[in-house]
């Protein structure tokens, strides 16, 4: 089918899952076995609850009830999968098979309900004429034999709030189609009976001796006459004729002398599809017959079957086995049907109808036939108003979309003295057609609208359109109820997935003047512009400005700006200019017409763009390399003497030799460079403060490297960088976290460049002097959260070399700040006192000393575990080849007293020492202990 316009068919909506690509011609020639395995779903009776909480798959006598559960997929992503809740055979009568099924969710009677059903009832129709009702766990609640012919179709109608005051309120009902009759069960009566039967099952399971007879079912049974064949039906509901239609109908039936009643009668309308006539219209006058009352065949009392209660006969205790068998063999009485003649139809002797699907508003119906046509019927007038050709074996459904008035931009209007009333939300209906022979799913705007969307799907799918929601609601209980139901879905047995279709309202607006349709056209034009391969970026910037300013709706403007900011081809200057232009245009508008959310969004993105530009400029400036510090200067900086510093160098050198890890680096991988697209994705503004979104470790390190790596290498000004980040709105705690992540993750580069210790010391001193970094109430007798944050990062790190160096720097800066605080405090009391020869004590300093000892021990143990005594081994077992895990202070503390011994034992086993060497080591230790005085 040709598209009416290019831009109405692309990108308007999406599957809930990934859209299936169109198969190639070679893939169509599949093997016979694969075709048979994919085609099995077409032979099954399938039903999915509108609440998406239960699925029934049945074939012949067997059935499976599937319930959704959250599980982890093969990729580690949590997703909802259907698992078997119950399976077994459902047949009770000999030779009967399942012919139709429905999953009806029942509303909860509790006031605190949040829109989810209380439980779901499974209704199964059989070829024997029985209709049986089950719980989710396969327990039979009740069974009804309302007609002795096979059940052809089960359909349900639930309560819907009337859109207009003149629309007749429809009652809930369950309709059952037989070859020559239709039975409608009142929804309220069915709801009460199912609740009573379920309560009876629960009581019988608890005590075994209670029997509460549920209320009888109220139903109507109509014998459909003057029709050769019926294969499907639709119960439209109660309708009231207008005076003109009343006179026209009376004249057609009784002639021009027919008497006309003063009040217009109410009628229940039924539409059937089949043969002779192809489509039949039936009208049953309300009050012309009294509802029949059926004796409920309670499953617990009659013991038909139960997945829970399949014990020996006579468990209720009041009947013998022979009496019960006689009762079971005796079929209940079947009431005769009330004759109902066809009023009129669409006569076509060669055309045979296959299915009918009623629209959500009960005004239209779609019908499929054996000629590969899909017809659209006007239910009220009884006319075929549209036909689609080339859809053999088609499956159909409907989607109803409500206009969202909140997305509409506030328009300037002339206020009259009478005020202005806001028009109600409009409703659009779309017909969904699945053509299995072509493997395509199409969405059409009704009544005479174009095709608005098409998807390539498999050829063995099933389109499920329930046409109802949750049973048990009324005009009072439905207020404030937010039903969580789907409208239509597609089951794909090949990939084992269920997909739903979402259609935006604006696709129903085929008028060229529609603002929403125009906005979507501009968005798609902008998307094509950003994807086009062109070297003229100035032209791209100018066209993007023009397009985004032409868009009317704020939500669409925001969407367009987001797509521009996410583009990798648009340079930073163009991004800033476009955002600035949009913000200036918004500010120039009247205050009433300005969308505050969009204005704030532009201001925040502009701040981030300016920050990115400032940081990039600082990183690009080449600084004069400072004079490298000598070992003595580094030792004084870390407050260590010569022996302690030499020992630290030896430990780090041994650790570096044993922990060299080869890493693959590409030519374009450069530290300290981050694309503006990623920068905008990582950061967000909230109340003039910059926050980092939840990122994985690699992205977090990349963001920190963009800020601090050039500073740590001495290639950028540390003071200017800290001032820029602080003025932009970063908190010191967030900057400290980013700095430590970069330092600890780049251990190899840091150990190769000892001068980075000086840069870290400078950076940490500047961050500590920022506002709210160290609490003003902090003194030497309390623990500062600032330093505790840094110690926690060192404790959790598995890069022990970098963690030990950062701990030394942290201890040095802490001692420096503590000394300055103590010097200020005591200089007021002791004037001229010599304070160079003493060091101020604080609780944080002692914690640093403890951590330094722990990190040093962990470093030594890590060096040992990664050392190799033997370079060549003849045979290595799989356990010996397994690498030892990296250690951290946190892991050692959590491991307890035996943690270190366990790690050393694993290393000895990995080295494959002979027992003689271990004995020699033990003897040497004993001799050394005896020689000690």
Image: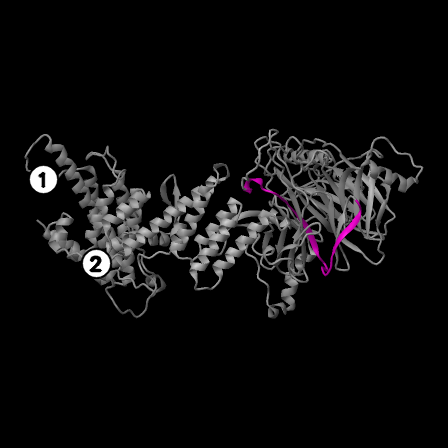
Vertical position of residue 391 compared to residue 267: above or below: below
Vertical position of residue 713 compared to residue 156: above or below: below
Which class describes the residues within 10 Å of circle 2: few (<14), some (14-19), or many (20+)?
A: few
**Residue interval drawn in magenta:** 381-408
Of residues 91 and 838, the one nearer the viewer is 838
Answer left or right for 52 relative to 338.
Answer: left
Q: CA distance from mark 1 to mark 2?
A: 32 Å
Answer left or right for 908 relative to 150.
Answer: left
Q: Earlier in the sequence, mark 1 or mark 2?
A: 2
Tell me where residue 754 appears, x and y as whole percent: 19, 56
Tell me where residue 198 appears, x and y as whole percent: 66, 36
Image quadrant where one finds the N terminus: bottom right
**Residue under circle 1?**
838
**Residue under circle 2?**
753
Of residues 324 and 247, the one nearer the viewer is 247
Residue at image x 42%, y 57%?
Answer: 570
Of residues 406 and 829, the one nearer the viewer is 406
Question: Is residue 69 shown in magenta?
Answer: no
Disc 1 vs disc 2: which is toward the camera?
A: 2
């Amino acid at each position: 089918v040709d598209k009416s316009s290019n831009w109405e068919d692309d990108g308007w909506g999406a599957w809930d899952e990934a859209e299936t690509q169109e198969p190639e011609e070679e893939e169509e020639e599949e093997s016979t076995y694969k075709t048979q395995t994919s085609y099995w779903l077409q032979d099954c009776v399938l039903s999915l609850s509108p609440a998406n909480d239960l699925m029934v798959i049945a074939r012949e006598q067997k059935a499976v009830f599937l319930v959704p559960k959250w599980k982890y997929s093969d990729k580690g992503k949590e997703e909802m999968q259907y698992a078997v809740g119950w399976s077994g055979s459902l047949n009770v009568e000999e030779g009967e098979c399942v012919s139709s099924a429905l999953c009806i969710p029942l509303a909860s009677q509790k006031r605190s309900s949040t829109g989810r059903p209380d439980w779901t009832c499974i209704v199964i129709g059989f070829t024997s004429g029985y209709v049986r009702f089950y719980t989710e766990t396969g327990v039979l609640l009740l069974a009804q034999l309302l007609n002795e012919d096979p059940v052809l179709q089960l359909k349900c109608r639930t309560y819907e709030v009337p859109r207009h005051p003149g629309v007749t309120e429809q009652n809930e009902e369950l309709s059952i189609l037989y070859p020559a009759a239709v039975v409608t069960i009142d929804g309220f009566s069915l709801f009460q009976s199912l609740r009573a039967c379920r309560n009876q099952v629960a009581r019988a399971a608890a005590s075994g001796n209670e029997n509460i007879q549920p209320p009888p079912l109220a139903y109507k049974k109509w014998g459909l006459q003057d029709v050769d064949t019926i294969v499907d039906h639709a119960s439209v509901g109660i309708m009231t004729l207008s005076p003109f239609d009343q006179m026209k109908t009376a004249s057609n039936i009784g002639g021009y002398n027919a008497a006309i009643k003063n009040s217009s009668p109410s009628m229940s309308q039924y539409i059937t599809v089949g043969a002779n006539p192809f489509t039949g219209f039936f009208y049953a006058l309300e009050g012309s017959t009294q509802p029949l009352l059926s004796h409920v065949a309670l499953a617990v009392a009659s013991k038909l079957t139960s997945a829970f209660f399949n014990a020996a006969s006579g468990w209720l205790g009041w009947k013998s086995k022979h009496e019960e068998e006689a009762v079971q063999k005796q079929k209940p009485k079947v009431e005769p049907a009330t004759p109902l003649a066809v009023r009129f139809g669409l006569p076509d002797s060669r055309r045979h109808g296959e299915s009918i699907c009623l629209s959500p508003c009960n005004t239209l119906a779609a019908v499929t036939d054996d000629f590969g046509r899909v017809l659209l019927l006007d239910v009220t007038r009884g006319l075929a108003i549209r036909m689609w050709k080339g859809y053999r074996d088609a499956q159909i459904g409907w989607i109803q979309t409500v206009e969202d008035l909140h997305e509409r931009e506030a328009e300037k209007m002339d206020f009259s003295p009478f005020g202005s009333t806001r028009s109600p939300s409009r409703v659009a209906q779309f017909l969904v057609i699945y053509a299995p022979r072509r493997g395509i799913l199409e969405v059409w705007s009704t009544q005479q609208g174009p095709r608005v969307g098409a998807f390539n799907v498999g050829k063995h799918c099933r389109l499920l359109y329930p046409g109802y929601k949750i049973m048990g609601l009324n005009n009072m209980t439905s207020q404030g109820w937010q039903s969580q139901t789907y409208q239509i879905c597609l089951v794909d047995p090949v990939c084992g997935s269920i997909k739903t279709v979402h259609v935006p309202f604006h696709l129903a607006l085929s008028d060229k003047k529609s603002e929403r349709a125009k906005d979507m056209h501009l968005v798609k034009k902008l998307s094509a512009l950003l994807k086009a391969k062109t070297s003229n970026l100035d032209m791209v910037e100018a066209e993007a400005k023009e397009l985004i300013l032409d868009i009317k709706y704020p939500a669409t403007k925001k969407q367009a700006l987001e797509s521009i900011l996410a583009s990798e081809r648009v340079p930073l200057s163009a991004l800033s200019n476009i955002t600035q232009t949009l913000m200036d245009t918004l500010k120039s508008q009247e205050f009433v017409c300005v969308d505050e959310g969009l204005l704030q969004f532009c201001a925040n993105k502009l701040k981030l763009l300016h920050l990115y530009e400032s940081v990039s400029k600082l990183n690009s400036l080449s600084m004069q390399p400072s004079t490298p510090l000598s070992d003595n200067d580094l030792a004084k900086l870390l407050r260590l003497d010569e022996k302690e510093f030499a020992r630290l160098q030896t430990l780090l050198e041994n650790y570096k030799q044993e922990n060299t890890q080869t890493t693959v680096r590409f030519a374009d991988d450069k530290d300290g460079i981050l694309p503006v697209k990623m920068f905008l994705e990582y950061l967000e503004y909230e109340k003039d403060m910059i926050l980092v979104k939840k990122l994985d470790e690699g992205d977090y390190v990349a963001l920190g490297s963009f800020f601090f790596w050039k500073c740590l290498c001495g290639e950028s000004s540390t003071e200017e960088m800290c001032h820029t980040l602080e003025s932009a709105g970063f908190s010191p705690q967030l900057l400290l976290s980013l700095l430590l992540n970069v330092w600890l993750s780049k251990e190899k580069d840091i150990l190769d460049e000892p001068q980075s210790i000086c840069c870290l010391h400078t950076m940490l001193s500047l961050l500590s002097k920022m506002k709210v970094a160290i609490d003003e109430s902090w003194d030497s007798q309390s623990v500062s959260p600032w330093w505790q944050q840094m110690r926690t990062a060192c404790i959790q790190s598995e890069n022990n070399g970098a963690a030990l160096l950062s701990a030394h720097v942290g201890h040095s800066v802490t001692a420096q700040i503590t000394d300055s605080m103590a010097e200020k405090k005591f200089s007021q009391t002791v004037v001229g006192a010599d304070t160079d020869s003493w060091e101020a004590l604080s609780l944080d300093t002692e914690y640093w000393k403890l951590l330094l000892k722990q990190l040093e021990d962990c470093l030594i143990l890590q060096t040992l575990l990664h050392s190799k005594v033997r370079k060549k081994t003849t045979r290595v077992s799989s356990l010996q080849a397994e690498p030892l895990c990296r250690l951290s202070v946190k892991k050692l503390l959590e491991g307890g007293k035996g943690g270190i011994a366990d790690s050393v034992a694993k290393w000895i086993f990995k080295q494959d020492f002979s027992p003689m060497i271990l004995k020699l080591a033990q003897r040497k230790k004993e001799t050394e202990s005896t020689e000690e005085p």
